[in-house]
Amino acid sequence: MVIIPDLKPTQRLHVFDLVEEAGFDVTDWVESSNDPRGPKANPKYCYEWSFIQSGKLVILNLWYSAMREEGGLIVQRGNFREDAEYHRTMTRKSSWAKRALRSDDALQIALRDNLPVRVIINDGKQRSRDDPELRPSKVTARELDPVPWTITGYDWKTGQHELTRGIFAQPCVDQFDLDLADKAEPQRTEVTSTPFIRDPAVRRRVLLRSKGKCELCGRQGFEMASGALYLETHHVIPLALGGPDKDSNVVALCADDHRRAHFALARDEIAERLKTIART
Ligand SMILES: [Zn+2]
C-alpha cells in the first residue's frame, strides 16, 4: 500500500524534462524558444500549471500537500475554476487565473477524449490565500509520478474535481456526460436544460459500481471511439415522481435496456427488478 510520504518529491527536476518523460511532445517548446537561458526556460511553457496534448495525454501540476490518503488510495480534490475566480478577483493576477482555467480545461479534455492523466508532484512553499502580498508559490522539489491518475469525479457545472492515483476500470460515460462534453471547446456554463438537478457524483459512482456492464442484462456497454464504455444512467423511481437522486435509486443500463425500462410492455416488472438492483 502506498503511503503518502513515499510520494513526497525529493529532487527539483525541470518541468521540461518531466513533461517529456511523461510523453508530451516538446517540439514547439524547443522551437518557439528564444530565451537566452535555453529552451527549458521558454516562458511560453515553463510556468504553465498543466499541459494538454490533444489526443494523447494531459499533465497536471499538483501539490504534494493537497494529496490525501483515503482507504488506501491517494486522492486530491479541488476546483480549478474556483482557483481562477480567486485569482481574478483577489490576487488580480490574470496569468494565474488563466493557468487555473487551463487546468480545468485539461480535466474536461481528458474526460471527453478519455486521455491518460499524468501528475507532476510539487513540494515547497505553497502560497497562502491569506498572504496579502503577491508572492508566488515556491517549488522546492518536483518529480513526475510514475503512476498515472484517474479523474474519479468531475462536476461539469461547478468544476469540482476528484483525482485518484492509479488506473481504475475502463472509464464509463453516460448520456449526460455526452450532452455536456459534446462541445468543441471546454465550457463552464450550465448547458443542460434538465428540469431536475442530478448530482454528477451519484451518476459517477453508479457508473463505477456497474464496472461498465448493464446492471440489468449484464452485457458490457458498447465501446466508444474514445475507448470509454457507454451506458445510460436511469432513475428507477423518476425524479419527477419524487424518486431520490441517490445511488440506491439509480442504475446503469445499456441503451437498449434503458429504452425498455421506459417504454416496454413489461416496464413495471423491469422497474421492480431495477429497484432491487439499485439497492444492492
Ligand atoms: Zn442491458
Image: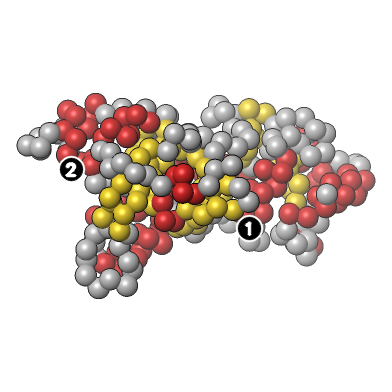
| Residue located 32% across and 34% down the image | 19
Q: Within 10 angstroms of label 1, few (less than 14), some, or many (20 or more) residues?
A: few
- Figure quadrant of residue 82: bottom left
Residue 226: which disc? none
Q: Would residue 79 be found to the left or right of residue 71 on screen?
A: left
Amino acid type for the residue under numbered disc 2: Pro
Nearest the camera: 128 or 24?
128
Q: Quadrant of the N terminus?
A: top right
- Identify the secondary structure beneath mark 1: loop
Nearest the camera: 209 or 75?
75
Residue 121's x, y, as percent? 38, 45
| Residue located 44% across and 56% down the image | 66
Residue 12's x, y, as percent? 28, 42
Q: Is residue 248 above or below residue 34?
A: below
Amino acid type for the residue under numbered disc 1: Asp
Q: Is residue 159 visible?
A: no
Going from N to C along the chain, the mark reached first, 2 or 1, is 2
- Identify the secondary structure beneath mark 2: helix
Residue 170's x, y, as percent? 61, 33
Q: Would residue 180 be found to the left or right of residue 254 on screen?
A: left
Q: Within 10 angstroms of label 2, few (less than 14), some, or many (20 or more) residues?
A: some
Nearest the camera: 167 or 185?
167
Mark 2 sits near ligand 1, with its Cβ under 8 Å away: no
- Figure quadrant of residue 127: bottom left
Q: Is residue 229 above or below residue 102?
A: above
Label 2 belongs to which residue? 43
Mark 1 sits near ligand 1, with its Cβ under 8 Å away: no
Label 1 belongs to which residue? 199
- Figure quadrant of residue 247: bottom right
Residue sticking out furthest to the left: 36
Residue 98's x, y, as percent? 29, 53
